[in-house]
Image: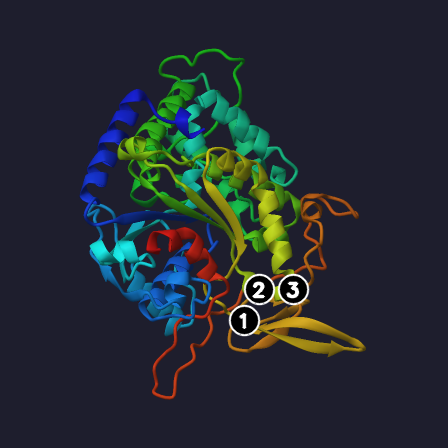
Amino acid sequence: MASSLTTFTDEARIALDTLSGRAAGMFAPTLRLGVTGLSRAGKTVFISALVHNLLHGGRLPLFEARKSGRIARAYLEEQPDDAVPRFQYEDHIATLVEERLWPDSTRAVSELRLTIEYESASGWSRMFSAGKLSLDIIDYPGEWLLDLPLLGKSYSDFSREAFEMAELPVRADLSQDWRSLSASVDSDADSDEITARRLSESFAAYLRACKLDERALSTLPPGRFLMPGDLEGSPALTFAPLPANGGRRARPGSLRAMMERRYEAYKTHVVKPFFREHITRLDRQIVLIDALQALNAGPGAMADLERAVTEILACFRPGRGNFLTDLVSRRIDRILIAATKADHLHHESHDRLQAIVRRLADRAIARANFTGADVDVVAMAAVRATREGTVKQGREILPVILGTPLAGETIGGQSFDGETETAIFPGDLPEKADSVFETGNGHRQNDADPTIRFVRFRPPRLERTAEGVTLSLPHIRLDRALQFLIGDRLA
């Protein structure tokens, strides 16, 4: 898909940008790591935990460079892109550690540079230079990635698919008001700003309703309708799909012509620059997936998440080049798909969670592997908010997790106050990954499995040493993620 998103002119600009970046990095090696995922998948937490553990000597036994003692130090530097907001690491860590709250979700692109000085594992390399790698971490909303397929779709295609999605059983009741409003307007009538705004606001309200926990749906383009930023209220965000008109060309000056023009403006001025300036400049990528939220909502949410993950992964440029092609074109040669919040499950279910996420991404993984990119799947928690234990229930011993649920979380009719630690048995994930995508047993598409229920926990209270030093943030398999994403560049 990625090759169809750009014109020859776009590719020429991308090549010039890449060549300039390669020249700048010839004597100061850099690696650009993209971090994405749909909302509340844990992007901000992942980046904060990664940096915190490297800066503070965290426990990372599977990260070879740290385990072998070859990392001399890690420190933050000024980022290279002055026009991109800085990832506010210090603020996020203060929220996590001091307030024990989860930081705000990613709302726009941000960047952070972490430089690692290390001793190469190769004696030959140590003879010529001291090891130094600048890791440029690019944080961006996964919802924006879901806009990239729009570059290859006409307004008619976009409208047709939007109505088809809106009529699915898991969405039909949420989209009813918008569909009724759309059916009541004459798209061939003269363009009217008030009508355009009403349609746009109704469509955006439907998308927001899809995103709520009760449905936890993921495929919600256009992404900026949910995260408009400084574009809020602009004509480029004041459009909506319209019912089919039999394939006729829109009459100049009509409402349909206005909507079509604004849709094209959205692609030109919002979507395409994001792809050209950020996605095409990445070397490595991690995609974070909150499968537990979708499992809570039922098979309809899982099927929708599968669709979203497939579209997200199809937007990258995976593969391996050679010395000459790499000078003018970046390819993402490693992609990690991470099932987050593994700490909300007992470790006995981690393999099953990993299998579910692999099933979500099967088709996209096969495509990336075909291009020569390495793809891996891991169940992880960048910040571990719970610990494990057991409770006796009659003659049965149940594996449980212990932590402090967020205020307002409920399970089994019990509501939590955000202060009380409790033991929770979330249930066992099914052995067969396919079963979580299937309706049956009397459940509708948007009915969750009542035997599985996950709640969200507060960040942990950090341990302190006898000297009063605060230890690094605890995690599950963050070290494995680091090894896959950057371990080879520190060899």
Outermost residue to the bottom: 466
Q: Is residue 242 visible?
A: no
Q: Residue at 36% of width from left, 13% of height from top?
A: 252
Q: Residues within 10 Å of mark 2 (few under 14, many from 20)?
A: many
Mark in front: 3 vs 1: 3
Residue shown at 55%/61% (left/top)? 342
Amino acid type of disc 1?
Thr
Q: Residue at x 79, y 47 (%)?
A: 442
Residue linked to disc 2:
344
Based on the displayed image, in which of its 4 quarters is residue 324 positioned? top left
Query: What residue does disc 1 label?
Result: 386
Between the residue at mark 3 and the residue at mark 1, the CA separation in whole angstroms equals: 15 Å
Q: Quadrant of the N terminus?
A: top left
Q: Position of residue 142 (x, y in %)?
A: 43, 44
In this view, 128 is above or below 206: below
Q: Is residue 305 rendered to the left or right of residue 21? A: right
Give, as a three-letter code, the residue at label 2: His
Q: Farthest residue in the right direction? A: 395
Rounded to the nearest whole Å, what is the CA distance between mark 1 and mark 2?
A: 7 Å
Along the line of sight, which residue is nearer the eye, 466 or 487?
487
User: Are circles 1 and 2 on residues that touch, CB within 8 Å?
Assistant: yes
Q: Is residue 202 above or below residue 189?
A: below
- Identify residue for label 3: 348
Q: Where residue 100 appears, x then y in whole percent? A: 42, 72
Q: What residue appears at the point 77 percent right and 45 percent down from the top-left corner?
A: 440
- Ranked by sequence position, the earlier of labels 1 and 2 is 2
